[in-house]
Amino acid sequence: MRLKSLVPFGDAGALTRPDFGLFGLHREIDRLFSEFAQGIGPSGKANIVPNIEISESDKAIEVTAEMPGLERKDVEISIEDDALTIRGEKKIEEQQKDKNVQHSERSYGVFYRVLQLPSGIDTSGVQATMSNGVLKITIPKPAKPEPRKIEVKEAA
């Protein structure tokens, strides 16, 4: 069972190839949207969009997201129309507000990730835990319908 991100991903080197053309332009636009959604601007500076890992067993799908510097209260998880949304906010620390920061490579703000789930997920069985800045979401797989033989009867 394969999950897919709802964020388009493209080819980062599309502009440098000689066969750029119309499809190359399409790939480049996809790449720019992907960078925007992933929080990486043209300068290459990363934002706070969490990196995720998706694994699966016979019974469940597990989504793991790295969220350094965040606590449970900073993260919201929802499932609607077979889409898993992870939303959070990294706020400026109170002690930082009083300082005159000369240089910072830290990122603050709101982020979200949306993943398309297989249809038929029972949302009541979804569990989420967070420890040491790592969020783990366990999603039970939907039960597969058993094949059933249907007897053909004589028409009356």
Image (spheres, rainbow, N blue to C red):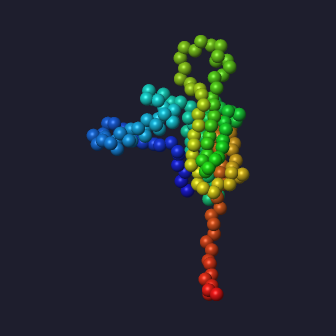
> In this view of the protein, which residue sits in the foreground, 135 or 113?
113
- Residue 107 position, x and y percent, is 56, 26
Q: Position of residue 144 (x, y in %)?
A: 62, 64
The residue at the far left in this view is 18
Residue 46, above or below 116: above
Residue 152 visible in the snapshot: yes
Residue 46 versus residue 130 in the image, above or below: above
Task: Look at the image and tell me in which quarter the C terminus lies.
Answer: bottom right
The number of discs equals 0
> What quarter of the picture does the N terminus occupy?
bottom right
* Residue pictured at 46% horizontal, 37% vertical: 33
Relative image position of residue 55 (x, y in whole percent): 58, 50
Is any part of residue 12 visible from this angle?
no
Q: Picture coordinates of residue 40 (x, y %)? A: 48, 32
Tell me what residue is drawn at x 30 percent, y 41 percent: 21
Residue for point 64% across, 47% down: 80
Q: Is residue 98 above or below residue 66?
A: above
Q: In the rendered image, which quarter is residue 49 located in?
A: top right
| Quarter assignment of residue 70 | top right
Which of these two is toward me, 31 or 64? 31
Residue drawn where x is 56% and y is 49% of the image: 116
